[in-house]
Amino acid sequence: MFSVSNPEHYIPILLFLLVAIGFGAVSITVGRLIRPKNPYKEKDSPYECGVPPINDARERISVRYYVIAMLFLVFDVEVVFLYPWAVDFNRLGLFGLVEMMIFIFVLLVGYVYAWRKGALEWE
């Protein structure tokens, strides 16, 4: 029976914790000792696909960017539901076909709604 009052039950946990902390500390220390130390201006500057940075990296991004990203994720994740349906199409029969047509119709309505609202325009 396990009892909380016996400290010998906590020895494996303590050893595991010490090994984990020691491994991290040793890895960082060894890396700091053996890496080359020759900083220069080009090395310390941010890298943006080979193009020198023009302005501050903390500039404001349009909300449209996030809306388009969220719409992409919503439609992409919902399309993933088509794969299991296609795998079990023979077993599901007409009932599965009707349900999937309703699902695709709802996706199509959402897509048309987003299109008409201008959420897919990038200007």
Image (tube, rainbow, N blue to C red):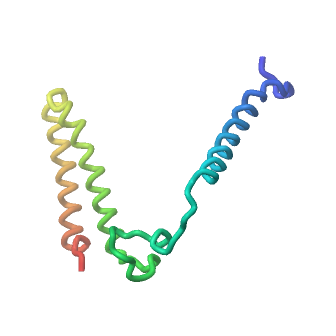
Q: Nearer the viewer, residue 32 or 108?
A: 32
Q: Residue at (57%, 61%) from the top-left corner?
A: 37
Residue 9 drawn at (x, y percent): 78, 25
- In the image, residue 48 sits, relative to residue 90, either above or below, namely below
Q: Residue at (14%, 28%) from the top-left corner?
A: 90
Q: Residue at (22%, 74%) from the top-left corner?
A: 121
Residue 26 drawn at (x, y percent): 67, 44
**Splitting the image into 4 quarters, where does residue 48 fall?**
bottom left
Left/right placement of residue 29 relative to residue 105 reads right
Left/right placement of residue 41 relative to residue 104 reads right
**Where the C terminus falls, by quadrant?**
bottom left
Q: Nearer the viewer, residue 104 or 2?
A: 2
**Where the N terminus falls, by quadrant?**
top right
- In the image, residue 95 sits, relative to residue 120, either above or below, namely above
**Splitting the image into 4 quarters, where does residue 56 fall?**
bottom left
Residue closest to the far right: 5
Q: Nearer the viewer, residue 123 or 50?
A: 50
Left/right placement of residue 94 relative to residue 47 reads left
Residue 51 drawn at (x, y percent): 33, 74
Q: Residue at (41%, 82%) from the top-left corner?
A: 55
